Image (spheres, rainbow, N blue to C red):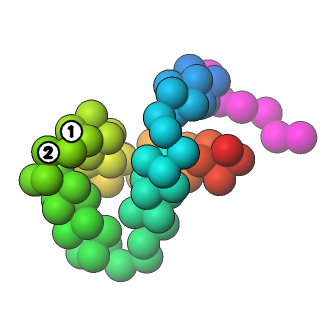
Amino acid sequence: MTQRLPIEDPMAEALATYPPQVRSLMLEVLTIRDNSERAREIGDLHQSGIAPATAELLIDAEQDPALRAVLVGILREM
């Protein structure tokens, strides 16, 4: 069993409040290998206005590779 970082438990609790389909979409977007394609998908989500908080979190993760890695790990466990 791996030890969790201090940010992971609150982050997991917050992500657990998202509907499963949103978590699935987040994982799908975060794991796109091509940086420009991933950025385009995040931009499209942000512009749609459907899930602004989700888009903002994905933008933050795009700017912070460590956050992106934490999110991917948590979402995969869910």
Q: Which mark is residue 19?
A: none
Real-space Cα separation, disc 1 to disc 2, in angstroms: 5 Å
Label 2: which secondary element: loop
> For residue 13, which quarter of the picture?
top right
x and y, in percent, of residue 24 in the image: 51, 55
Label 1: which secondary element: helix
Whether residue 4 is in magenta: the answer is yes
Q: Which mark is residue 49?
A: 2
| Residue 7 in view in this figure | no
Q: Is residue 8 rendered to the left or right of residue 45?
A: right
Which quadrant holds the C terminus? Answer: top right
Give the magenta range.
Answer: 1-7
Query: Amino acid type of disc 2?
Result: Gly
Residue name at image x 57 percent, y 31 percent: 16
x and y, in percent, of residue 60 in the image: 29, 42
x and y, in percent, of residue 43 in the image: 17, 59
x and y, in percent, of residue 50 in the image: 21, 45
Residue placed most toward the observer, 54 or 71:
54
Magenta-colored segment: predominant secondary structure: loop
| Residue 38 in view in this figure | yes
Residue placed most toward the observer, 67 or 32:
32
Q: Which mark is residue 52?
A: 1
Query: Amino acid type of disc 1?
Result: Pro
Compared with 70, 36 (above or below) is below
Q: How crowded is mark 2: few (under 14 residues within 10 Å), some or many (20 or more)?
A: few
Residue placed most toward the observer, 68 or 24:
24
Residue at the extreme left of the image, as rendered? 47
Q: Is residue 20 rendered to the left or right of residue 4?
A: left
Q: How crowded is mark 1: few (under 14 residues within 10 Å), some or many (20 or more)?
A: few
Residue name at image x 25 percent, y 66 percent: 41
